[in-house]
C-alpha cells in the first residue's frame, strides 16, 4: 500500500515538473488564443453579414461582366480569323455568339431566333450569311464546334429564360422555350460548347415537367 502511494505521489510530481518546465511565453500565448476562437461568432452581427453578402454579390457581378467581355472578344477574334475575304453586301462569314453572328468584318448580324433554335446553334459555331438582292438574310451553318450536353432546371427572370446546370446559369432563347412548350421548373437537356466558356446554350429537349 505504501509503495502504491509513493508511486502516485511521484507521478503527480512528474506532471507538475513537466508543466513548470514549459516556457512561460507559451503558456501565456495559449491562454490568450483560446478565448479568441469563441469570440469569432459573436462579432458577425446581422449588419456585418449583410455587408459581406453585398461584397460577394458585387464580386460576382464584376466577374460576370469580365467573363462577358472576354467571351465577346474571343468571338470577334475567331470571326476575324476565318479564311477568305469579306464580300461586302453579298456573303459574310462569321461566328455565332448565342444571339447574333459576329462577322469577319467586325459587325454583328441578327440571327433569326427560330433558325438558331431549330438548328440548335451554340456559341462558336461558324456561319455563312448570304445577303440576297432584296435584303433577305440566308444563313448556313458551316462549322459546328464540339458540343456536350447538360441537364438542368428551367428558370424565368423578368421574361428571360435560363437553365441552371452543373452549378452554372445558361441563357436560352425564348423561341426554344416556346417551341418545346417548356415552363419554369421543367428539367431541360441543353447543348453547350465543350471546350470554351459560354453564357448561352441550345435547348435539346424537355425531359420532365416541373
Image (cartoon, rainbow, N blue to C red):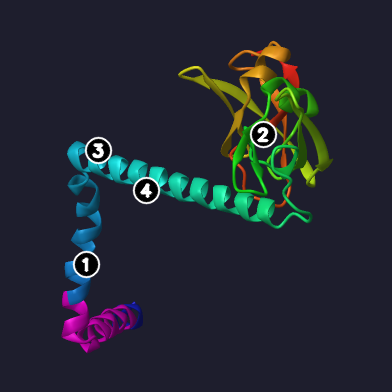
**Which label is found at residue 59?**
4
Q: Answer left or right for 170 relative to 193.
A: left
- The span picked out in magenta is 7-28
Q: Answer left or right for 60 relative to 117.
A: left
Which of pointers 2 and 3 indicates the residue nearer the eye? 2
For label 1, the residue is 33
Q: Quadrant of residue 150?
A: top right
Q: Is 210 colored magenta in this rendering?
A: no
Cβ atoms at labels 1 and 3 below 8 Å apart: no
Q: Earlier in the sequence, mark 4 or mark 2?
A: 4
Report how far apart the C-alphas of labels 1 and 2 lie in the structure.
51 Å
Q: Please say if 115 is above or below 1.
A: above
Q: Residue placed farthest to the top in the image?
A: 181
Report how far apart the C-alphas of labels 4 and 3 lie in the structure.
14 Å
For label 3, the residue is 50
Residue 204 appears in view: no
**Which label is found at residue 201?**
2
Which of pointers 4 and 3 indicates the residue nearer the eye? 4
Residue 3 appears in view: yes
Amino acid at each position: 500500500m505504501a509503495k502504491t502511494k509513493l508511486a502516485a505521489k511521484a507521478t503527480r510530481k512528474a506532471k507538475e515538473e513537466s508543466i513548470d518546465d514549459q516556457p512561460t511565453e507559451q503558456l501565456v500565448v495559449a491562454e490568450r488564443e483560446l478565448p479568441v476562437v469563441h469570440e469569432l461568432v459573436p462579432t458577425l452581427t446581422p449588419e456585418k453579414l449583410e455587408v459581406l453578402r453585398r461584397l460577394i454579390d458585387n464580386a460576382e457581378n464584376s466577374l460576370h461582366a469580365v467573363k462577358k467581355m472576354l467571351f465577346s472578344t474571343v468571338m470577334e477574334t475567331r470571326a476575324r480569323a476565318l479564311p477568305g475575304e469579306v464580300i461586302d453586301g453579298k456573303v459574310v462569314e462569321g461566328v455565332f455568339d448565342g444571339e447574333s453572328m459576329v462577322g469577319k468584318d467586325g459587325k454583328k448580324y441578327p440571327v433569326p431566333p427560330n433558325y438558331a433554335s431549330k438548328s440548335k446553334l451554340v456559341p462558336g459555331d461558324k456561319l455563312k450569311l448570304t445577303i440576297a438582292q432584296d435584303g433577305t438574310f440566308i444563313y448556313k451553318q458551316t462549322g459546328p464546334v464540339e458540343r456536350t450536353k447538360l441537364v438542368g432546371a428551367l428558370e424565368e427572370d423578368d421574361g428571360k429564360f435560363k437553365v441552371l446546370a452543373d452549378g452554372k446559369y445558361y441563357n436560352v432563347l425564348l423561341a426554344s422555350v416556346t417551341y418545346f412548350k417548356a415552363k419554369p421548373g421543367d428539367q431541360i437537356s441543353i447543348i453547350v460548347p465543350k471546350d470554351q466558356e459560354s453564357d448561352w446554350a441550345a435547348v435539346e429537349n424537355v425531359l420532365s415537367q416541373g
